Image (cartoon, rainbow, N blue to C red):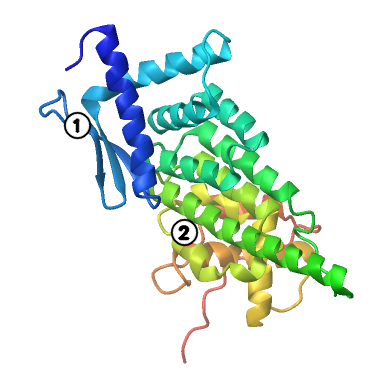
Amino acid sequence: MAESEEEVDVLVQRVVKDITNAFKRNPNIDEIGVIPCPEARYNRSPIVLVENKLGVESWCVKFLLPYVHNKLLLYRQRKHWLDREALVDITCTLLLLNPDFTTAWNVRKELLQCGVLNPEKDLYLGKLALTKFPKSPETWIHRRWVLQQILRQSPAVGCCRKQQLGDAEQADGGRSQQLSDHLARTLHQEMRVCSDAACRYPSNYNAWSHRIWVLQHMAMGNVKNLTLNKERRLLQTFKHCACSRTFLNGAHVEIVQRCLQSLRIYAAREYHSHYRYLAYRSFVSWCWGFLGLRIRVIPACVVLRIRWKCPDAQGRYVEFKPPPPLI
């Protein structure tokens, strides 16, 4: 194991390069982790790549993390120069080990704004960091910032496109279609990232908040791509109170409403009564699928929350009605 400062520098530079080469060899890495290994037993790289999983042996982390941390701080203090390629590699390594280091994300924002990085690459890095640190608030905040940059490139998001006439207008229509398809793919990716983070840590407030933001800002023009089955699978592992914030969200209720409209399974109702009906139906669908013999009553906390969010002007609510007795 390296002991002198020069040996540590050589070791860490090699590890950073090995991590970069691992992503070049396999661009489909979908998970990262730390392999428990108190000391270096073999004269080999501590970076292990098996199929689509990337592991870092724990003995090198105590050398690697302080090194890239100090390098980046010296760069921000203008005491040390790093070229753009080195900045990309150092920030990537640092954020995989410590995604809550705000300075590293800010450096990547600057690299993205000057065109060195593309938004998809940064979203991919954040996705990998969340496989190890699913509650990292700085990672979720940076994802929203990157998504805002993507949304700015598509002024037509959430709007109905009119029929284009003429060659020039047809070209604009083709570009709008490409942007719409790209946003639809990004939407599905974000929903999948939220689902994976929720599975790793069910009471994940940051994942839920990010999911609400995505629904509010990205989903309204892509409602047809969301289905109730996907929503139900996402929330199977959540407790009742944990999911109330999401199923009472206006954007999500509207999505469910459009899904139900397409299936023709609800009738026209008064505004708040209609939204209460959708919230009850969504909650039951997510948690149980239906109300039956063993599931009779929705929890009181859920009922109170729904009534508070969508109150009746005259305070008249329909209570639980048991089925009529069989004669």
Residue drawn at 69 percent across, 60 percent down: 179
Q: Position of residue 324 (x, y in %)?
A: 52, 82
> What element does badge 1 sit on?
loop
Residue drawn at 32 percent across, 15 percent down: 9
Specify the label residue 57 is tagged with: none
Q: Are marks 2 and 1 in contact (CB under 8 Å)?
A: no
The one of 64 and 130 positioned closer to us in this rendering: 64
Q: Position of residue 76 (x, y in %)?
A: 57, 15
1 up-or-down from 228: above or below: above
Q: Would residue 300 be visible to someone looking at this image?
A: no
Q: Would residue 294 be visible to someone looking at this image?
A: yes
Q: Quadrant of residue 253?
A: bottom right
Q: Is residue 209 left or right of residue 17?
A: right
The one of 320 and 186 positioned closer to us in this rendering: 186
**Number of numbered discs on residues:** 2
Q: Position of residue 269 (x, y in %)?
A: 76, 72
User: Label 2 is placed on what type of residue?
Assistant: Leu
Callout 2: 10 Å neighbours few (<14), some, many (20+)? some
Q: Residue furthest left?
A: 41
User: Label 1 is placed on what type of residue?
Assistant: Pro
The one of 85 and 47 positioned closer to us in this rendering: 85
Callout 1: 10 Å neighbours few (<14), some, many (20+)? few
Specify the label residue 234 is tagged with: 2
Q: CA distance from mark 2 to mark 1?
A: 31 Å
Q: Earlier in the sequence, mark 2 or mark 1?
A: 1
Residue drawn at 58 percent across, 67 percent down: 226
Residue drawn at 35 percent across, 50 percent down: 26
> What element does badge 2 sit on?
helix
39 up-or-down from 36: above or below: above
Badge 1 is on which residue? Answer: 36
Quadrant of image for the N terminus? top left
115 up-or-down from 307: above or below: above
